[in-house]
Amino acid sequence: MPKVSISRLKNAPPILRVAELNKVFKSTGGDTQALDNINLDIEKGEFICLLGASGCGKSTLLRIIAGFETATSGEAALYGRTIDEPGPDRGIVFQDYALFPWLTVYENISFGPRHRGLSSEEVRHTTEKFLKMVGLTAFSKHYPSQLSGGMKQRVAIARVLANDTDVLLMDEPFGALDALTRAKLQEELLEIWEQTNLTVIFVTHSVEEAVVLADRIVVMSASPGRIDSDITVELPRPRDVSSEQFNALRRTITQKLSSNLGAVRQAKSIISD
């Protein structure tokens, strides 16, 4: 895989802005504040990882950016327009693939282009392009039940790409995969990102995965979810997970997460006392 320089990202205006965003879930048992005063600017072509332990609000933030949830106050805006509903400019990939089981690989990927009203030739060209990009041309007539987990996730990524999205949102997409498949898909995702110049927002709880993938790692703390730190990763790609620089950064981020978890436990202990 070619090395990717993050210098191409500097001085570009943000395409996505999250400003003073709060999210409160209301229930009969009381209100729960999931996100507290989130501020985040993301430039076109950036690869951002949202990193944090379970319950820190990273998936909630992703769903607000996707348009599946609404903020209680503040806003998320794409190209200066407030996000208040889902749209084809933001495609999301989940851990559980969310494929149509009754459609073939080809039909899953062509679903978006067909419903956008493209001509038959445009649908065919787009579908074949992304089938090839994810290495599944030979499996175009297979159904999801006939595929491995890694192959299903490739279909899910291709389906989003075929919909001509600007921002690729990924909610722990490789979390259910074995280590070898996960590493392979991380490499393939970076290759796709480099080819397409997509903006990627990737949710993970794995420090190593974040350091492998991201231009910037946004570390979130919990109870309520806040941005603890925003770390630029200057390591050249492809990244060597055994290098001294890689492991120094991994240790620094792990310490931040451990510190956050310790603070949450202490706060809960004080409350319970």
Image (cartoon, helix red, strand yellow):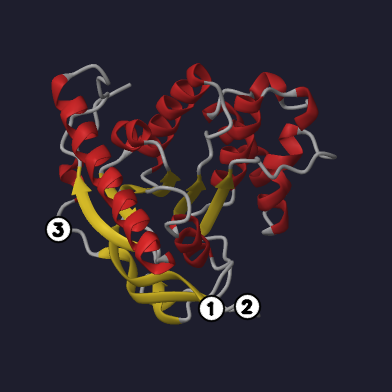
In the image, is residue 201 above or below residue 105? Answer: below
Q: Callout 3: few (<14), some (14-19), or many (20+) C-alpha neighbours within 10 Å?
A: few
Instruction: Identify which residue, 61 or 3, lies in the foreground.
Output: 61
The residue beneath circle 3 is: 11
**Secondary structure found at label 3:** loop
User: What percent of the width, then of the height, locates residue 26?
Assistant: 58, 79
Task: Between label 1 and label 3, give the one nearer the viewer.
Answer: 1
Q: Residue furthest right?
A: 102
In the image, is residue 58 above or below residue 244? Answer: below
**Secondary structure found at label 1:** loop
Instruction: Identify which residue, 126 or 61, lies in the foreground.
Output: 61
User: What percent of the width, then of the height, locates residue 142?
Assistant: 78, 25
Residue occupying the point 23% across, 40% down: 255
For residue 57, which numbered disc appears in the image? none
Q: Residue furthest bottom?
A: 73
Q: Quadrant of residue 246?
A: top left
The residues bearing labels 2 and 3 have C-alpha atoms spaced at a distance of 43 Å
User: What percent of the width, then of the height, locates residue 102?
Assistant: 85, 40
Mark 2 is on which residue type? Answer: Ser
Q: Which badge, 1 or 3, comes first in the chain's sequence? A: 3
- Proximity of marks 2 and 1: CB atoms separated by less than 8 Å: yes
Instruction: Identify which residue, 196 or 144, lies in the foreground.
Output: 144
User: What percent of the width, then of the height, locates residue 56?
Assistant: 42, 57
Q: Callout 1: few (<14), some (14-19), or many (20+) C-alpha neighbours within 10 Å?
A: few
The residues bearing labels 2 and 1 have C-alpha atoms spaced at a distance of 6 Å
Q: Callout 2: few (<14), some (14-19), or many (20+) C-alpha neighbours within 10 Å?
A: few
Q: Using residue 43 as the reference point, say whether residue 135 is left or right of it.
A: right
Residue 251 appearing in the image: yes
The residue beneath circle 2 is: 27
The residue beneath circle 1 is: 31
Mark 1 is on which residue type? Answer: Asp
